[in-house]
């Protein structure tokens, strides 16, 4: 990366930003991000970015509302200082699940936040495994949508877990992702129909396809409470699955998620570091972390070439 571009990390996943920076041969640009005692956030650039392309690296995870405000302030500061382009690198885009008015009286949060980012000054977004492709169309600027699938497939091959595999989408929303996995592996495909009862509870309605005597690979974009994955694993086991693995791009692992995973029949859960993972997640023997740094380094590197032409 030449000095025509800078890489700035928000506070959500500094380790991943640093790793991507290392792969591109650059260190993080100095910024200060502080919280006032009343809860307000203040950001300040420590050097000028005038005329430079600025890559803001921020996963909107864990405390998504805080991270979103921080991102908007960083982008605003960069725009006010005259950055030539502002590229938001957002491995996990929070609020993507709230993308339709599926019932009366709710907001379409993903659409609203796309507008906020545009208003603040974002020119380009790089993100990974969005909950739905639809979200991409909410942004009125280009979006590079990368995927962790190739990383997972490589890890599965290395661990010789690709034989006699059926990819299972743990809900109908995961059908597209599961179908892409099944084509690329290649492997069979099955789908689960689930009903979400509330934020923490799901009910499995049916399993479409055959998993009897097979190795199942559950594939989903997000694991939050792990209710979806572990309920899906339970039904697969009841239907005769021999072994059960899972690949999830974004590991939020909230509340009792790890305990549920431990108690489930999932043998191993592959997850990326798109979201900063707590030490207890990394230490969990069922969890295998696959870094997505190389996917982002490659996406950034092709944009850099464009800005430096
Ligand atoms: C929902 O449709 C997503 O693809 C995930 O299945 C869901 O967000 C996972 O949430 P949880 O782990 O809380 O069940």
Image (cartoon, rainbow, N blue to C red):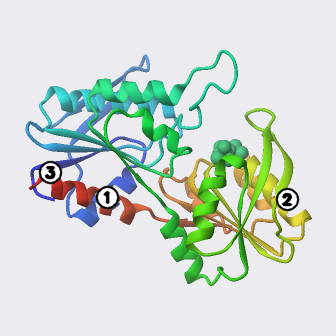
Check disc 3: other Cα within 10 Å, few if <14, some if 14-19, many if 20+: some
Which residue is found at the position 38% from the left and 41% from the top? Answer: 11
Check disc 2: other Cα within 10 Å, few if <14, some if 14-19, many if 20+: some
> Earlier along the polypeptide chain: callout 2 or callout 3?
2
Element type at mark 2: helix
Dot 2 corresponds to which residue? 234
- Name the mark on residue 114: none
In-image side of 117 versus 306 (left or right)? right
Residue 178 horizontal/vertical position (percent): 64, 60
In the figure, residue 35 lies in which quadrant? top left
> Earlier along the polypeptide chain: callout 3 or callout 1?
1
Q: Look at the numbered discs 3 and 1 and tell me whether their residues touch, using CB distance below 8 Å.
A: no
Q: Look at the numbered discs 1 and 2 and tell me whether their residues touch, using CB distance below 8 Å.
A: no
- Name the mark on residue 299: 1
Element type at mark 1: helix
Q: Nearer the viewer, residue 166 or 13?
A: 166
Quadrant containing ligand 1 reads top right
In-image side of 73 versus 30 (left or right)? right
Check disc 1: other Cα within 10 Å, few if <14, some if 14-19, many if 20+: some
Residue 298 in view here: yes
Element type at mark 3: helix
Residue 218 horizontal/vertical position (percent): 70, 62
Q: Nearer the viewer, mark 2 or mark 3?
A: 3
Residue 119 horizontal/vertical position (percent): 31, 23
Question: Which quadrant: the C terminus?
Answer: bottom left
Residue 151 horizontal/vertical position (percent): 49, 69
Does the beta carbon at disc 2 come under 8 Å from ligand 1? no
Dot 3 corresponds to which residue? 307
Q: Is residue 211 above or below residue 71?
A: below
> Earlier along the polypeptide chain: callout 1 or callout 2?
2
């Amino acid at each position: 990366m030449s000095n025509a571009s800078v890489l700035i990390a928000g506070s959500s996943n500094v380790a991943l930003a640093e790793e991507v920076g290392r792969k591109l041969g650059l260190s993080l640009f100095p910024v200060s991000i502080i919280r006032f005692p009343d809860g307000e956030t203040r950001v300040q650039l420590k050097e000028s970015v005038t005329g430079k392309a600025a890559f803001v690296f921020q996963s909107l995870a864990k405390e998504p509302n805080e991270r979103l405000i921080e991102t908007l302030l960083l982008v605003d500061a960069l725009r006010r200082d005259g950055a030539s382009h502002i590229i938001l690198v957002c491995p996990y885009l929070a609020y993507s699940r709230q993308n339709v008015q599926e019932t009366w009286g709710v907001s379409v949060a993903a659409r609203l936040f796309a507008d906020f980012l545009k208003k603040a000054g974002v020119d380009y977004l790089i993100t990974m495994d969005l909950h739905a492709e639809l979200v991409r169309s909410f942004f009125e600027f280009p979006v590079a949508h990368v995927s962790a699938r190739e990383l997972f497939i490589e890890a599965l091959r290395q661990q010789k877990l690709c034989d006699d595999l059926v990819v299972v989408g743990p809900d109908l929303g995961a059908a597209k992702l599961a179908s892409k996995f099944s084509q690329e592996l290649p492997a069979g495909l099955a789908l689960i129909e689930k009903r979400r009862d509330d934020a923490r509870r799901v009910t499995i309605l049916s399993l479409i396809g055959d998993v009897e005597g097979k190795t199942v690979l559950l594939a989903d974009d997000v694991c939050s409470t792990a209710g979806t994955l572990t309920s899906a694993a339970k039904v697969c086991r009841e239907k005769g699955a021999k072994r059960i693995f899972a690949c999830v791009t974004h590991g939020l692992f909230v509340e009792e998620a790890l305990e549920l995973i431990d108690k489930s029949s999932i043998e191993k859960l592959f997850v990326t570091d798109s979201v900063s993972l707590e030490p207890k997640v990394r230490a969990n023997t069922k969890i295998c972390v696959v870094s997505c740094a190389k996917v982002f380094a490659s996406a950034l590197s092709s944009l850099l070439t464009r800005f430096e032409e």
